[in-house]
Amino acid sequence: MLFVLISAILIVLKLLDIVPVALWPWWWILSPLGIAILWWSWSDKSGRTERKAMEEHESKRKARRKKSLQALGMGGRHHKKD
């Protein structure tokens, strides 16, 4: 996402003819977009994207469980029953 933001800023600066960006060739201005595409492609192929989504899902699930236990007055502690 950072590379897309950088590229968007460079495109705006190029279109507004702000020096020194106005003097740079277009391939240089658009290169962060190419880097972003390569990153996303690698991230998908390596399974990183799916792993991150699973970690986020698990984190949310644990937070919901903790909140539910606190609402029941258990506070997430283990209670012994005699």
Image: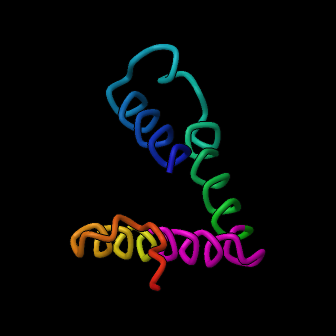
Scheme by which the image is coloured: rainbow
Residue 74 is situated, as x and y percent measured from the top left of the image, at: 33, 71
Q: Which residues are magenta?
A: 43-59
Q: Is residue 35 above or below residue 9?
A: below
Q: Nearer the viewer, residue 43 or 27?
A: 43
Q: Residue at x 62, y 78 (%)?
A: 50
Q: In this picture, is 8 found above or below 71?
A: above
Residue 58 on the magenta segment:
yes
* Image coords of residue 55 (percent x, y): 58, 71
The chief SS type of the magenta part is helix
Q: Was residue 42 drawn as part of the magenta stretch in this picture?
A: no
Residue sitting farthest toward the left: 71
Q: Residue furthest front?
A: 82
- In the image: residue 79, left or right of residue 31: left
**Residue found farthest to the top:** 19
Give percent across and percent down for residue 45: 75, 78
Q: Is residue 10 left or right of residue 33?
A: left
Residue at 52% across / 75% down in the picture? Answer: 58
Please tell me which residue is depicted at 61% across the width and 34% down the height of the picture.
Answer: 25
Residue most extreme to the bottom: 82
> Which residue is drawn at the image coordinates 52% and 15% (left, top)?
20
Q: Quadrant of residue 40?
A: bottom right
- Between 49 and 68, the one lying in front of the other is 68
Nearest the viewer among 29 and 68 is 68
